[in-house]
Amino acid sequence: MRRGTQVVEDGGEMPNLILSVGGMTCGSCEDSIQRAVSLVEGVRSVRADHRTGRVDVEADSGVGVEALREAVEDAGYDLEGATGAGRS
């Protein structure tokens, strides 16, 4: 497994979501975000980058931004924005 990538489950085509997360400052922050977001039902993979504040999420179409926001905030970070796959 490459650092910054956590594959949760293999699957078919999945929508892509890009989250903007505030408060990530190091590799441990990336790990915390990835662990929290990967626990959201329907999330297939997560990749966080503390240098850019970006978290790439591949998930089933039923995964909503609010569920991801809750996971990010429960981990102690701020979800500043989300784009992709027709979700707002």
Image: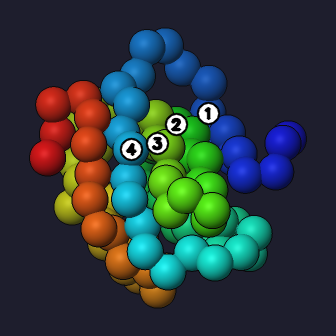
How far is disc 4 from disc 1 in space, using C-alphas? 18 Å
* Residue farthest along the top direction in this orientation: 12
Callout 3: SS: strand
* Residue farthest along the bottom direction in this orientation: 76
Sequence-first disc among 2 and 3: 2
Give the amino acid type for the residue marked by disc 4 in the picture.
Ile
* Residue 18: assigned label: 4
The answer to whether residue 83 is above or below residue 14 is: below
**Is the residue under label 4 in contact with that under label 3 (CB below 8 Å)?**
yes
| Residue that badge 2 annotates | 44
The 10 Å Cα crowd at callout 3, few under 14, some 14 to 19, many 20 or more, is many
Callout 2: SS: strand
Q: Quadrant of residue 60?
A: top left
| Residue that badge 3 annotates | 57
Sequence-first disc among 2 and 4: 4
The 10 Å Cα crowd at callout 4, few under 14, some 14 to 19, many 20 or more, is some
How far is disc 3 from disc 4 in space, using C-alphas? 6 Å
Q: Quadrant of residue 34?
A: bottom right
Callout 1: SS: loop
Question: Horizontal and vertical percent for residue 13?
Answer: 43, 14
**Is the residue under label 3 in contact with that under label 2 (CB below 8 Å)?**
no
> Depth check: 40 or 33 in front?
33
Callout 4: SS: strand
Q: Is residue 67 visible?
A: no
Q: Is residue 81 visible?
A: yes
Residue at 26% in and 43% down: 83
